[in-house]
Image (cartoon, rainbow, N blue to C red):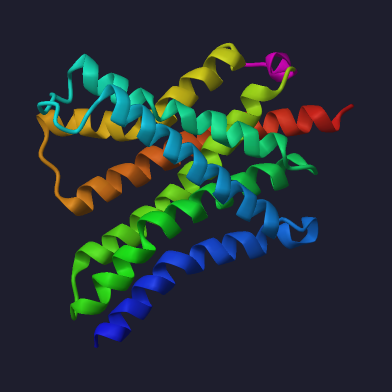
């Protein structure tokens, strides 16, 4: 029973990544090793973030409130992720959709390998059933969408012709706001949790709605800019 539970969790965790890779036609661009390269950059970026947090926010420091300035600075370290994704995008040749999806899958794939695989291998095999592992797997699937969306935002931000888009709000300003909303997703949900108590399933649902809402807006800008590029 424990092995069956472990198998279900692994399938729920990794199959969406495989399907995304397969049906995005990334194999036509030889993107597998680019995904590996993206994963290495992810690991290096997380190491740099850990060093920054260990240097400026030592673990023995007293606990800080979610609303505190110190907590905001800690969350702001995640801005380094944008730099890492930008570096991946710059190192990948080819069409924009291949670059964005490759960067997103490489980043998200490294994340689940480093943060989820050991958890499932050690813990999920040791119990007959626990919803927490299913929840972790579902959260990783949401993160896949989130990272692909973030890669699309970084690509949009890097385009010099972004300002040519017709929009009520300046496209540059809109993309900057979306980038901040992407980076501070966890902080925003934690802030909401100050006033409302959520269980684990509610948090997953909120993350899904939050990510999907941002993704739809990003998709609009991405599609418009891709169409504009195709005109020239």
Quarter of the figure that contains the C terminus: top right
Please name the residue shown 63% across and 53% down the image: 35
Residue 13 quadrant = bottom left
Above or below — where is 25 with respect to 8? above
- Residue 157 spot, x, y in % from top left: 62, 23
Q: Please give the count of numbered marks on the rendered protein.
A: 0
Q: Is residue 17 left or right of residue 116?
A: right
Q: Is residue 117 left or right of residue 133?
A: right
- Residue 27 spot, x, y in % from top left: 74, 62
Residue bounds of the magenta highlight: 161-168
Nearer to me, 90 or 9: 90
Residue 119 quadrant = bottom left
Instruction: Using the rendered image of the protein, determine whether residue 129 is visible from the camera's viewpoint.
Output: yes
Please name the residue shown 49% across and 46% down the image: 43
Above or below — where is 15 with respect to 92? below
Residue 220 quadrant = top right
- Is the magenta region chiefly helix, strand or loop? loop
- Residue 18 spot, x, y in % from top left: 57, 66
Nearer to me, 56 or 73: 56
Q: Is residue 213 magenta?
A: no
Nearer to me, 85 or 132: 85
Q: Is residue 218 left or right of residue 55?
A: right
- Residue 186 spot, x, y in % from top left: 30, 35
Please name the residue shown 52% across and 18% down the image: 176
| Residue farthest toward the right in the current orientation of the protein | 232
Nearer to me, 8 or 48: 48
Above or below — where is 122 with respect to 193? below
| Residue farthest toward the bottom in the current orientation of the protein | 1
Quarter of the figure that contains the N terminus: bottom left
Q: Is residue 40 left or right of residue 50?
A: right
């Amino acid at each position: 029973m424990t092995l069956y539970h472990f198998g279900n969790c692994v399938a729920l965790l990794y199959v969406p990544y495989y399907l995304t890779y397969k049906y995005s036609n990334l194999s036509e661009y030889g993107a597998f090793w680019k995904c590996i390269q993206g994963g290495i950059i992810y690991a290096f970026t997380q190491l740099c973030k850990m060093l920054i947090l260990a240097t400026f926010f030592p673990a023995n420091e007293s606990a800080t409130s979610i609303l505190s300035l110190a907590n905001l600075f800690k969350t702001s370290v995640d801005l380094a992720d944008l730099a890492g994704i930008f570096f991946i995008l710059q190192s990948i040749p080819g069409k924009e959709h291949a670059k964005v999806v490759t960067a997103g899958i490489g980043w998200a794939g490294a994340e689940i390998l480093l943060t989820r695989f050991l958890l499932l291998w050690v813990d999920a095999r040791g119990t007959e059933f626990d919803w927490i592992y299913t929840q972790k797997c579902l959260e990783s699937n949401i993160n896949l969408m989130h990272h692909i969306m973030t890669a699309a935002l970084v690509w949009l931000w890097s385009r010099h012709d972004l300002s040519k888009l017709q929009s009520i709000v300046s496209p540059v300003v809109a993309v900057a706001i979306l980038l901040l909303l992407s980076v501070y997703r966890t902080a925003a949900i934690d802030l909401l949790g100050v006033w409302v108590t959520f269980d684990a399933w509610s948090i997953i649902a909120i993350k899904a709605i939050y990510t999907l809402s941002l993704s739809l807006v990003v998709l609009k800008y991405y599609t418009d800019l891709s169409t504009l590029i195709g005109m020239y």
